[in-house]
Image (cartoon, helix red, strand yellow):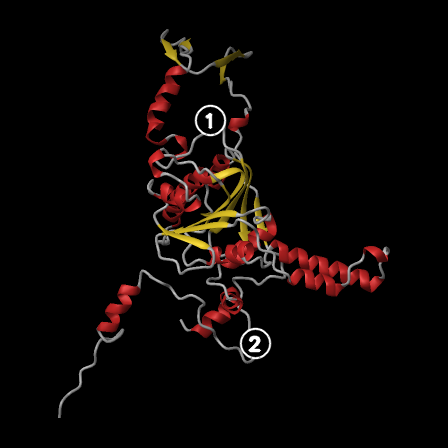
C-alpha cells in the first residue's frame, strides 16, 4: 500500500508524522490523559511493551521537557477561550482579568518536572529518547523484576531477592498486544495473559494511589476483568480513545488509586500472590468449610430415601401433591455481576480514525519519524532482496 493512500485513509497516521510522533498510538495516550488526567503529580513512570516508543516519547516531552499536551493543552485552550469571552463581553472585575497575550505567553513556557524517572521495557530494541532508560527484557519472566528495580533505583541490591521497589512509581503503562490471528476468542485470551503479566509487574513497583493503564481486547469476560482489578484499584474504567479504530476490539483499561489488600505482596514467581499454591489453597478452603448432610426425602411410590434439594409440598383439592424446590439463595453482593463502565475519549471535534479525509492541496507525504529498528519481517525482506525482489531474478538470453 502506498504512502499517499494510507495518509488519505488514516488522518492520525498523517498527523503523527506532521507533529513528530513515532507512531499514531501517541494520540491514544494523549486522549486518555484528556479524560483521566493521567500525568497529574506524576514523576516516575514505567512503560511496558514500549516499542517503537511513541508513549515513551509522550512521557519525555510532557514530563522531562515540560511541553503541554493532552489535559494541560486542553485546559490552556479553555483558559484562552474564557479570556477572549471576557474581553468580548466586558469583564466584571477588571483587576482580576489577565490579557490574552499574557495567557499565551504563560502557555508557551516550558515547565519541566523535577526528579523525573522513566523506564521503558520491550523485547524489541527501542531507539534512544531523551531522559528515557530503555530495557530489552521479557515482562513475563521473573528475572525482569530485578532489572527494572535496578533501573528505577541505582542502589538496589539484587542479592536481597526483594521484588518490591524501594521508591515506587506513580504510573505504569502497557500498550502491548500479541500478533493477532483473526480468531477473536484466541486473541482475547492471549491478550489477557499479556495483561496479566503487565499487572503483576505493575503491582511490584506501583505506590499506593498510583495508576495503571493497559490495552485490552473487549470480549464477554471484560466484566470479570473489571471485578478482578477492583480488588487493587478504587476506580476502574474501560476507555476507547477516538484515535482507536471503532472496527477494532482494542480498548484500554484505566485503573486509578492503587489500594492493595492488607498483607498483599506481589511477585512474578507467585503471580498475584498465589502462583502455584492456588490448588493447595483451594483444597484447604474446601476442607475448612462446614460439612452438612444432604436433605433426604421419602419417595411415596418406592418408599425409598432419595437425596434431593429442599422442597415444599402442597396438597390441592384433588389430592394431587405439588412439589416445588425451595430457593435458599440470598442476594449477596458476590452474586451480582459487575458491569464495567465504558467511556469514549475524545469529542466530535477530533478526527475519526475510521473515516477518510481529503488531503489538502500541495500535501507532501512525509517519511516516518522513526523507522522500525528490528521488524520481524526484516529477514524476509533481506531474503527477497537477495533473490532479486518479489519476482526473482530475470534471466537474459545470449545471442
> Which residue is found at the position 47% from the left and 50% from the top?
118
Q: Counting other residues with Cα less than 10 Å from the Cα at mark 2, is it few (<14), some (14-19), or many (20 or more)? A: few
Report the residue at 60% width, 58% height from top: 68
Q: Do we see residue 373 in this rendering?
A: yes
**Residue under numbered circle 2:** 360
Near-viewer residue (306 or 378): 378
- Identify the element where label 2 is drawn: loop
Q: Residue at x 53, y 77 (%)?
A: 363
Q: Residue 175: x percent and y percent?
A: 45, 51
The quadrant of the image that shows the N terminus is: bottom left
Report which quarter residue 370 is drawn in: bottom left
Label 1: element kind: loop
Q: Position of residue 42 (x, y in %)?
A: 55, 47
Which disc number belongs to residue 263?
1
The residue at 72%/61% (across/down) is 103
- Outermost residue, left direction? 399
Q: Look at the image and tell me whether residue 321 can be seen.
A: no
164 above or below 61? above
Q: Position of residue 243 (x, y in %)?
A: 53, 58
> Is 398 on the left or on the right of 175, as rendered?
left
> Considering only vertical position in the picture, is 355 above or below 278?
below
Amino acid at each position: 500500500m502506498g504512502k499517499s493512500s494510507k495518509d488519505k485513509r488514516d488522518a492520525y497516521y498523517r498527523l503523527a508524522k506532521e507533529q513528530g510522533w513515532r507512531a499514531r498510538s501517541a494520540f491514544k495516550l494523549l486522549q486518555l490523559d484528556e479524560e483521566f488526567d493521567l500525568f497529574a503529580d506524576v514523576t516516575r513512570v514505567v512503560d511496558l511493551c514500549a516499542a517503537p516508543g511513541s508513549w515513551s516519547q509522550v512521557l519525555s516531552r510532557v514530563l522531562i521537557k515540560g511541553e503541554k499536551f493532552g489535559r494541560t493543552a486542553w485546559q490552556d485552550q479553555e483558559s484562552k477561550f474564557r479570556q477572549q469571552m471576557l474581553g468580548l463581553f466586558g469583564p466584571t472585575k477588571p483587576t482580576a482579568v489577565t490579557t490574552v497575550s499574557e495567557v499565551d505567553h504563560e502557555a508557551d513556557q516550558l515547565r519541566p518536572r523535577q526528579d523525573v524517572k522513566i523506564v521503558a521495557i520491550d523485547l524489541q530494541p527501542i531507539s534512544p529518547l531523551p531522559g528515557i532508560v530503555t530495557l530489552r527484557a521479557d515482562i513475563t519472566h521473573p528475572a525482569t523484576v530485578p532489572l527494572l528495580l535496578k533501573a528505577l533505583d541505582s542502589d538496589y541490591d539484587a542479592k536481597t531477592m526483594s521484588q518490591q521497589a524501594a521508591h515506587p512509581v506513580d504510573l505504569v503503562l502497557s500498550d502491548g498486544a500479541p500478533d493477532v490471528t483473526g480468531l477473536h476468542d484466541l486473541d482475547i485470551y492471549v491478550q489477557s495473559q499479556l495483561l496479566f503479566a503487565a499487572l503483576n509487574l505493575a503491582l511490584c513497583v506501583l505506590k499506593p494511589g498510583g495508576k495503571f493503564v493497559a490495552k485490552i481486547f473487549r470480549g464477554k469476560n471484560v466484566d470479570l476483568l473489571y471485578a478482578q482489578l477492583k480488588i487493587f484499584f478504587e476506580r476502574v474504567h474501560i476507555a476507547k480513545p477516538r484515535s482507536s479504530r471503532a472496527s477494532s476490539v482494542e480498548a484500554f483499561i484505566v485503573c486509578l488509586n492503587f489500594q492493595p489488600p492488607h498483607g498483599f505482596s506481589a511477585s512474578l514467581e507467585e503471580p498475584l500472590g498465589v502462583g502455584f499454591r492456588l490448588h493447595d489453597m483451594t483444597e484447604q478452603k474446601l476442607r475448612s468449610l462446614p460439612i452438612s448432610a444432604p436433605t433426604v426425602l421419602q419417595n411415596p411410590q418406592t418408599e425409598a430415601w432419595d437425596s434431593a434439594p429442599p422442597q415444599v409440598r402442597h396438597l390441592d383439592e384433588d389430592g394431587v401433591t405439588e412439589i416445588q424446590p425451595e430457593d435458599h439463595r440470598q442476594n449477596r453482593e458476590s452474586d451480582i455481576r459487575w458491569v464495567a463502565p465504558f467511556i469514549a475519549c475524545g469529542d466530535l471535534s477530533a478526527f475519526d480514525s475510521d473515516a477518510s479525509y481529503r488531503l489538502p492541496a500541495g500535501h507532501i507525504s512525509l517519511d516516518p519519524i522513526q523507522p522500525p529498528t528490528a521488524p520481524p519481517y526484516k529477514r524476509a525482506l533481506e531474503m527477497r532482496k537477495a533473490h532479486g525482489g518479489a519476482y526473482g531474478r530475470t534471466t537474459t538470453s545470449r545471442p
